[in-house]
C-alpha cells in the first residue's frame, strides 16, 4: 500500500503531539499501528500525543519515517519547514544480503539507494532486511543505513545492532561481550523474543561487517 502525501501544515503553537496525531489520522493509523511501524511503545505514543512526554531524537527519527513526514514538519521548527524544498541526496550501494567486503568493491551490489546528503559517507551502504530477528525494532523489508566497519572490536559496539557474518552466513543482531572464567565470549542477541541468543565460540569464523546507523525506509 502506498503512502498518502503529507497534508500536515504548520499551526502556530502546536506541539509535536498534535502534529503526530493529525498525521496519524491522515494515514488512517491507530496508535497501535503507528507504534508497530515505528518500533515504539504504544503507551509512549499516547503520552507524546497528550503532551505528557518528549520524544528523543532517535524516536523522532523513527516516527518521521513511519509517518512519511519530514522531521522539521513533525517537530515544527518554523514556517519554512512546510515549504516544499528540493532534497539534496546522494546514492549509496543497496544490498539484499550482508556484503562480505567493502561496499564499493562487492560484486553483490546491483542497485543504488538515495539518502539525504548529510547521511552519506563513502563507507556507508544500505541493507534491505530479510531477517525477522530484530522485530519489532526492525522488520523484514526495512532498509537501514550501515557503517562498514570490518575491523571494529565487539567491545566497541556493545549493545549495537550489527551486520555480522558467522561462518560466512549473514545475521543482524545486537552484539555484546561477556567474560566468563577468563574467556571472552561474544553473544549475538535479537530483539525478537522468539529468537534465542547465539554464543560465538573460538571454533566459528565471526566478523562484524558494519553497524546499523539508522532506519531510512519502511513500507506502510
Image (cartoon, rainbow, N blue to C red):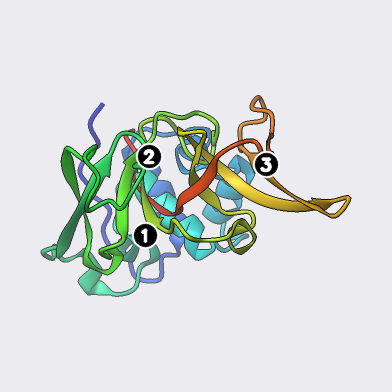
**212 over 94 or under it: above or below:** below
Q: Position of residue 141 (x, y in %)?
A: 35, 31
What residue did someone put label 3 on? 202
Q: Does the CB distance between marks 3 and 2 fall below 8 Å?
A: no
Relative depth, front residue between 66 and 124: 124
- N-term-proximal mark, 3 vs 1: 1
- How many other residues sit within 10 Å of disc 2, few (<14), some (14-19) or many (≥20)? many
Left/right placement of residue 218 relative to residue 212 reads left
**129 over 174 or under it: above or below:** above
Q: Position of residue 218 (x, y in %)?
A: 34, 39
Element type at mark 2? loop
**Disc 3 and disc 2: Cα gap in Å?**
22 Å
Question: Which of the two discs, 1 and 2, sits closer to the camera?
Answer: 2
- How many other residues sit within 10 Å of disc 1, few (<14), some (14-19) or many (≥20)? many
**Disc 3 and disc 1: Cα gap in Å?**
48 Å
Q: Residue at x 21, y 40 (%)?
A: 107
Q: Position of residue 104 (x, y in %)?
A: 22, 53
The quadrant of the image that shows the C terminus is: top left
What residue did someone put label 2 on? 98
Left/right placement of residue 147 relative to residue 84 reads right
Left/right placement of residue 63 relative to residue 188 reads left
**Disc 1 and disc 2: Cα gap in Å?**
33 Å
What residue did someone put label 1 on? 74
Element type at mark 3? loop
Amino acid at each position: 500500500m502506498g503512502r498518502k502525501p503529507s497534508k500536515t501544515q504548520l499551526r502556530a503553537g502546536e506541539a509535536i503531539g498534535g502534529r503526530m496525531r493529525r498525521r496519524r489520522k491522515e494515514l488512517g493509523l491507530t496508535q497501535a499501528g503507528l507504534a508497530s511501524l515505528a518500533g515504539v511503545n504504544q503507551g509512549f505514543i499516547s503520552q507524546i500525543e497528550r503532551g505528557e512526554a518528549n520524544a528523543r531524537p532517535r524516536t523522532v527519527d523513527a516516527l518521521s519515517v513511519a509517518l512519511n513526514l519530514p522531521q522539521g514538519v513533525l517537530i515544527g521548527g518554523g514556517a519554512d519547514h512546510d515549504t516544499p524544498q528540493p532534497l539534496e541526496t546522494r546514492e549509496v550501494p543497496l544490498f539484499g544480503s550482508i556484503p562480505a567486503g567493502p561496499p564499493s568493491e562487492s560484486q553483490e551490489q546491483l542497485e543504488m539507494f538515495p539518502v539525504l546528503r548529510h547521511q552519506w559517507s563513502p563507507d556507508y551502504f544500505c541493507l534491505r532486511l530479510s531477517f525477522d530477528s530484530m522485530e519489532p525494532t526492525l522488520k523484514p523489508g526495512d532498509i537501514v543505513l550501515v557503517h562498514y566497519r570490518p575491523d571494529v572490536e565487539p567491545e566497541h559496539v556493545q549493545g549495537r545492532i550489527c551486520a555480522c557474518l558467522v561462518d560466512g552466513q549473514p545475521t543482524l543482531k545486537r552484539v555484546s561481550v561477556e567474560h566468563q572464567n577468563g574467556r571472552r565470549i561474544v553473544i549475538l542477541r535479537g530483539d525478537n523474543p522468539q529468537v534465542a541468543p547465539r554464543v560465538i565460540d573460538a571454533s566459528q569464523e565471526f566478523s562484524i561487517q558494519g553497524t546499523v546507523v539508522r532506519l531510512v525506509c519502511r513500507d506502510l
